[in-house]
Amino acid sequence: MISMVVHGGAWDIPEDLIASHRDGVTRALRVGCAVLNDGGTAVDAVEAAIIIMEDDETFDAGRGSFINSAGDIEMDASIMNGENFRAGAIAAVSNVRNPITLARRIMEDSEHIVLVGMGAIRFAREHGVKTCGQDELITTRELDRWRKAQRRPNSSTRNAFRRKKVPVDTVGAVALDQYGNIASGTSSGGTPNKYPGRVGDSPLIGCGTYADNSVGGVSTTGWGEAMIKVVMAKTVIDLMDRNGNDPQKAASDGLKILERKAEGYGGIITLNNAGRVGIAYNTPRMVRAYMNSEMHQPIILV
Ligand code: GLY
């Protein structure tokens, strides 16, 4: 069995943005599955799928990331290999085109797991990961959104989150390869108009991303502060470990914990170690797509 699931955000996605979201996750899934079918590893597939969505300005990752209150982009990303528990992550990084690639380089070429800010950029330059100016990442859509936010300096993001109105286009992927290995990854520009230096759940291993070959893999999207409170990704893995490896029940039960303990919202994707998928969200919409070697067509849903 090879299997892959991807997501491109969970929120009240407006009608006029549905087609671009659907297209983005479809392309990401196709590229990731092609990697798996060609004998690539789960880590290769997760990186390849997330690069597609980072390069697609529809999503809050890479180009198209939300702009913080100081007018900068600060991106978060992580990747984890369930074969050996190795992981790599970056937080509050402004100048890379593909944060997931930098996270992978940290996982594979360093003794560390998380690098932030200028140290992460220094590591990127030393390891041949493409850096860029913020002009390559900032889009007109996000500049307009940021300008509007500057005119409402006292508006509460927390209340907007409670109304499920804050856009959450964080992207992620989980894959099972033909060697039986699971990998997970997540990439995000964070939340709109966030305080400079704010770090969400996406780069935190156990919160936004987790993978363990003996159980499964998880990636999350949603209100990061709430996800962090319940250590969302590892909580889902632990639930799955205890429930006989039922990924759908683990995702649904995990989401209930998020709601009950942190009043949080968002979405969860998971695969168990047999490649079965679980997806749960408590937002009006979540864009997600999955495929495995027993299926003839991918399932793409918004
Ligand atoms: N889940 C993405 C973030 O809150 O940063």
Image (tube, rainbow, N blue to C red):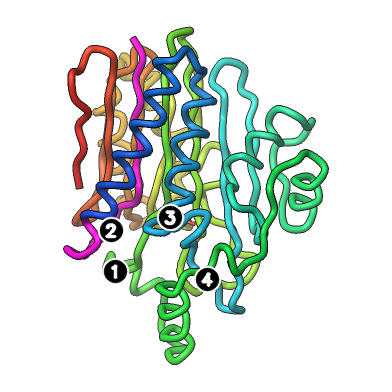
Residue topped by disc 2: 11
Label at residue 165:
1
Q: Residue at x 58, y 47 (%)?
A: 98
Q: Residue at x 28, y 58 (%)?
A: 11
Q: Which residues are magenta?
A: 1-18
Q: Position of residue 246 (x, y in %)?
A: 28, 20
Label 1 vs label 4, nearer the camera: 4
Find numbered disc 3 in the image and state the secondary structure of the residue it sits on: helix
Q: Residues within 10 Å of mark 3 (few under 14, many from 20)?
A: many
Amino acid type at circle 2 is Trp
Of circles 4 and 3, the one toward us is: 4
Reading the image, the residue beneath label 3 is 226
Q: Would you say the residues marked 1 and 4 are in contact, meaning their CB atoms lie under 8 Å apart?
A: no
Q: Is residue 203 above or below residue 146?
A: above
Q: Residue sitting at 55 percent across and 72 percent down?
A: 68
CB within 8 Å, label 2 to label 3? no
Q: Position of residue 32 (x, y in %)?
A: 41, 29
Q: Which residue is mark 4?
A: 67
In percent of the image, x 20 and y 32: which residue is there? 299
Q: Real-space Cα distance between discs 1 and 4?
A: 17 Å
Three-letter code for the amino acid on which mark 3 is drawn: Ala
Q: Earlier in the sequence, mark 3 or mark 1?
A: 1
Say whether marks 1 and 2 touch (CB < 8 Å).
yes
Callout 3–callout 1 Cβ contact below 8 Å: no
Residue 92 got which mark?
Answer: none
Q: Amino acid at mark 4?
A: Ile
Q: Earlier in the sequence, mark 2 or mark 3?
A: 2
Q: Earlier in the sequence, mark 4 or mark 2?
A: 2
